[in-house]
Amino acid sequence: MNRITVAVTFCLCPACLCAQWLPFKTPGIPRTADGKPNLAAPTPRTPEGKPDLSGLWRAGMNAGGVPYIVDLIQDAKDEAIFKPAAKAVLQKRLADLGRDWPPRHCLPVGPAHGLIGTYRIIQSPAVLALLFNEEVGDDYRQIFLDGRELPRDPNPTWRGYSVGHWEGDTLVVETAGFNDRSWLDMAGHPHSERLHVTERFQRTDFGHMQFQVTLDDPETMTRPLTIREVISYTPDTEMLEGVCENEQDAPHLIGRMSPGVKVSPAILAKYAGTYEMRDPVPGMPPGFLPPFTISLTDGLLYVGALPLIPQSETTFQEFDGRLLEFSLDGSGAVTGLTRVISDSESGFFQKH
């Protein structure tokens, strides 16, 4: 089950994964009497009567509190669906510390668009556009709603070819025609050119949208993988420009490996549990960092399906190079942990 058994340190990559927000009051949205955005207001609709999905949206994290773009697997047991050859590719990419993840080389992110942090949806009757910001560099995607079918023999591309149709109030999007150069996530899960992606968008009220994506690739998976999450409307802020301008540094992306230190199972067991952020960073969108769970399996702590490598009895390193440090009270009980959440911010997460 162990995915990696070394600590990793990432150099700065061209794609910025830090969290930043611009204070800007969104005009024309429903608000409560005290002026706050009314996220429970009814779903807006277009002149054609369809749900209007337009707006700035924020995707979530997997069950372990890890961004899907880092690792789309919610549970380590889900790794079993990948075939041996795909697992070998994953292990090679993990051993290389994700050095060749395409966005690090100013290339598009690929099939994981619906699971990336912040993006804007712009909707018209014939086409729906998604605009992405700094997390993977500026990028875009277009979904055709004019009744056309997927190409029978598409020319493989980074973003694939997307067509959508309405099933009641749910927008169903089919995408195919991906090249096999992109990764499913930063961890390195691979896919082939046979990948077929089905997405379902259902805006349940003004501030929330049910999102489901199914990845079906018979060449790399034994069965389709389905991910479900709630995407949240992000009011009173704006996206920042993200330009990939450091590709010349890509040859110098080198990870440093170390075996970590030995920590007794009794100490590790104390750290397992659910953690929730105590004091949100000012300006951070609500729910941006949801509670996450740390589990203990085979002598390693995991956040989701990615291991934490001990640097001391209280300090551990995550796959993307961030450090977290557990806090204990005078009796030795775990009170929480401090986790890096951006280039300049750390947050304290209280243990439940």
Image (cartoon, helix red, strand yellow):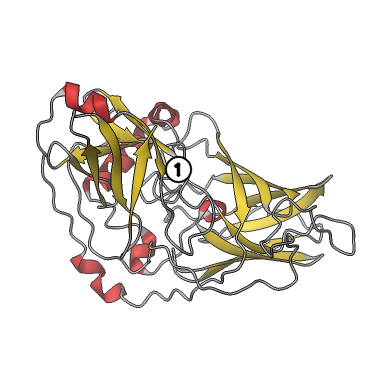
In the image, residue 105 sits, relative to residue 186, either above or below, namely: below
Residue 348 pos. (x, y %): 33, 48
Task: State which quadrant residue 227 falls in.
Answer: top right
Task: State which quadrant residue 155 falls in.
Answer: bottom right
Between 70 and 196, the one nearer to me in the picture = 70
Amino acid type indicated by mark 1: Leu
Q: Which residue is mark 1?
A: 72
In the image, residue 255 sits, relative to residue 315, either above or below, namely: below
In the image, residue 157 sits, relative to residue 313, either above or below, namely: below
Task: State which quadrant residue 230 falls in.
Answer: top right
Residue 295 pos. (x, y %): 33, 28
**Quarter of the C terminus within the rendering:** top left
The residue most toward the right is 48
Residue drawn at point x = 42 percent, y = 49 percent = 185
Q: Is residue 169 left or right of residue 104?
A: right
In the image, residue 122 sits, relative to residue 92, either above or below, namely: below
Between 218 and 230, the one nearer to me in the picture = 230
Could one spot residue 273 in this view of the protein?
A: yes
Residue 301 pos. (x, y %): 27, 32
Residue drawn at point x = 53 percent, y = 71 percent = 239
Question: Which structural element holds mark 1?
Answer: loop
Q: Is residue 197 left or right of residue 74?
A: right
Residue 153 pos. (x, y %): 63, 54
